[in-house]
Image (cartoon, rainbow, N blue to C red):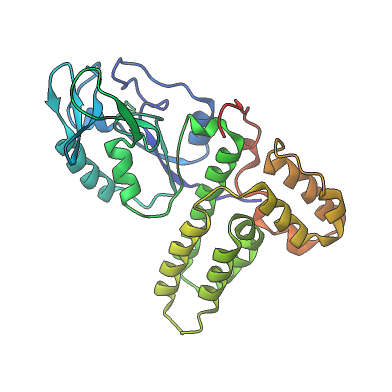
Amino acid sequence: MEHPVPVVFFSRCLGFAHCRWNGEVIRDDLASALAAKVEVVHECPEMAVGLGCPRDPVRVVRDGDTIDLLQPATGRSVGAAMREFSATYLASLPPLDGYLLKSRSPSCGWKDVKVYDTPLPGSAAKPGRGLFGEAILARGDGLPVEDEGRLKNFALREHFLGGVWTFARFRQVEAAGTMAALVRFHTVHKLFLLMHNQREMRLLGKIVANSQGLGIGQVLAEYRKGLGWALASPPKYGSLINAIQHAFGGFSESLSYRDERIPASVLLRLVKSWALRFGEKYLLEQILFEPFPLELVDLVDSGNLK
Ligand code: SF4
């Protein structure tokens, strides 16, 4: 299967520069493997707001109703600068297909970032977001967002990669700008979408049917929005089995054994071999069986995250 080349934003310290507060770079196998397959856009927001390298670490701090980014060692506040940089920088980017961020960073982190209750030493902290990560989510573009820590989990990794390549394929549809391209996209993604979210898959089908006779630009914009909702959460294992059974009713008996430790891609490879054996053309075209390049399937799972 031919795959497009997605455009993905990376936090710069994920292999591209020694820009962490202590002058280090993160060596991460998945980030490197992914970077080799996509067009990379990277930036270090802390360097961009002039914090230098090496630097004293910053932390996210709640101060009344506002959230700031503080450098405790110097008392410097860079919250406003980081927000301004984030807005200007993100608006300047080319169309993207996803974001891979540094986990738990007070700037790039998008989950489980320590947000301190007060600027005082010894303050308690709650989980929140870094300021740049927050600005990415505030774009509301529906694109896949992950961090290198969570990608050690195969279910999250396959969900992220599948989403990135799906949005890259959808950009090709937008470039073609025709209903024929959209119909084809929807047809080959049907089982993939069914696995993620049956309700949204049907709503996307209605957008494609275009009973209101909207112009192609509006149809594509609606579809893109719906695609983001459809792929918002990783599919449940039961939905994967349902999607396969839907396509391959005759084999449902063989799929009655559910072992959630088996990555979806492994199960799908098995089913694809059946489709090949029985010459099921409709099934062989389905993106479900290879939503992203196979070379990215076999990275090792740490098993630490769920
Ligand atoms: S996490 Fe973000 S801000 Fe921190 S070093 Fe990496 S790229 Fe720079």
Quarter-of-image position of residue 252: bottom right
Toward the viewer: 12 or 111? 111
Looking at the image, which residue is at 51% across and 84% down? 211
What percent of the width, then of the height, locates residue 285?
70, 59
Q: Quadrant for ligand 1?
A: top left
Residue 7 is situated, as x and y percent measured from the top left of the image, at 43, 46
Q: How many marks?
A: 0
In the displayed structure image, the side of residue 137 where residue 163 appears, left or right = right
Quadrant where the C terminus is found in the figure: top right
What residue is drawn where x is 58% and y is 33%?
A: 153
Residue in view at x 31 percent, y 48 percent: 93
Left or right of 294 on screen, residue 162: left
37, above or below 171, in the image = above
Q: Is residue 144 above or below residue 35?
A: below
Residue at point 35% right, 54% down?
Answer: 140
* 219 on left or right of 249: left
Q: Quadrant of residue 53?
A: top left
Residue lying farthest to the bottom in this orientation: 212
Q: Nearer the viewer, residue 227 or 241?
A: 241
Left or right? Give the position of 242 relative to 91.
right
Percent position of residue 215, x then y: 41, 79
The location of residue 243, given as percent across then percent down, is: 70, 57
